[in-house]
Amino acid sequence: MSIKVENLCHVYRKGLPEESKALDEVSFDVSDNQILGVIGHTGSGKSTLLQHLNGLLKADSGEISIDGMRLYAPEVSMLDIRKKVGLVFQYPEYQLFEETVAKDIAFGPKNLGLTEEEIDSRVREAMSLVNLDYDTFSEKSPFDLSGGQKRRVAIAGVLAMKPKILILDEPTAGLDPKTHKDILNMVVDIHRKEKNITVFVSHNMNDIANISDNIIVMDKGKCVLQGKPEEVFSHSDFIKSIGLDLPDVTQLMKDLGIEREDGKAIFSLDEAENMIFNMIGGSK
């Protein structure tokens, strides 16, 4: 499985006085079993980009290929694309609507025309992936759950479609610190178990640095940086110039004037501790 985006452009309100270019020649690749972090300030084009990856929006120019299948080829069905690509919007719990948790999670699989047995199997598997016990939660109303539990249900509804690519738009937004950590750990666990491609958008630079294999940085509709976390965050002055923060450890080491010999950014707490102890001649 892979994603290839080539020279993607999208213009909102095209031809009108308020015309706005949301994506401008965006190109990047994502390989199988990778987590791609996407960062950028509000209005940089992140959410617009995500909606192109499963066909909710169509580009004005450029191309997207999912596992070698060109999204805009006339013979390609959007239903087939959306079976492969699952998109979890920001605050997905606002889209819950069924009377029980199990029914809400089953909504997508039912629309695929699956048997009741297969639907039940998918619901149970999805609930297990998001750490919700089936016997405890399946018959509860989703509206009686906590905020974190509601979000798990919403994510489970997408997982029940068995996507090969999981796209998450700010999955930890608005959560308390403990629930934030729990949901982030859950995302990583799902990725490991499902061996899928995960595309993860966040304003939290610590989260992005810690779980991403590669990162793309969006600014004014363009992909202005891409690479591994240590490579991207080594451009600290540029990152800050476009209104973004650095991971906490990276900022601390920069403030202390401590750098790696290869010039790449330090964002691992273990690496930072080792470097500091080596500087003072001690050992952990």
Image (spheres, grey):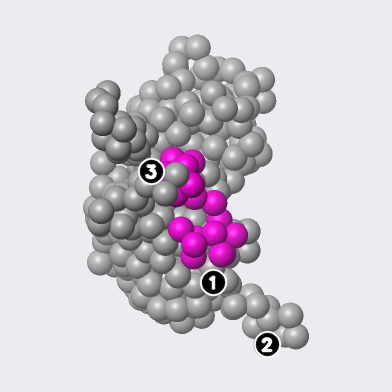
Q: CA distance from mark 1 to mark 3?
A: 27 Å
Q: Please give the label number shown on residue 127.
A: none
Amino acid identity at mark 3: Phe
The residue located at (51%, 19%) in the rendering is 138
Q: Residues within 10 Å of mark 3 (few under 14, many from 20)?
A: many
Q: CA distance from mark 2 to mark 1?
A: 18 Å
Q: Which residue is mark 1?
A: 221
Q: Which residue is mark 2?
A: 15
Task: Say left or right for 180 vs 186.
Answer: right
Q: Is residue 42 magenta?
A: no
Q: Residues within 10 Å of mark 2 (few under 14, many from 20)?
A: few
Q: Position of residue 17 (x, y in %)?
A: 75, 85
> Which of the two discs, 2 and 3, labels the residue nearer the N terminus?
2
Range shown magenta: 236-255
The quadrant in which residue 143 appears is: top right
Q: Residues within 10 Å of mark 1 (few under 14, many from 20)?
A: many
The residue located at (38%, 57%) in the rendering is 234
Which is nearer the eye, 61 or 23?
23
Q: Which residue is mark 3?
A: 267
The residue located at (45%, 34%) in the rendering is 184
Secondary structure of the residue carrying tag 2 is loop
Mark 2 vs mark 1: in front: 1
Mark 2 vs mark 3: in front: 3
Amino acid identity at mark 2: Gly
Quadrant containing the N terminus in the rendered view: bottom left
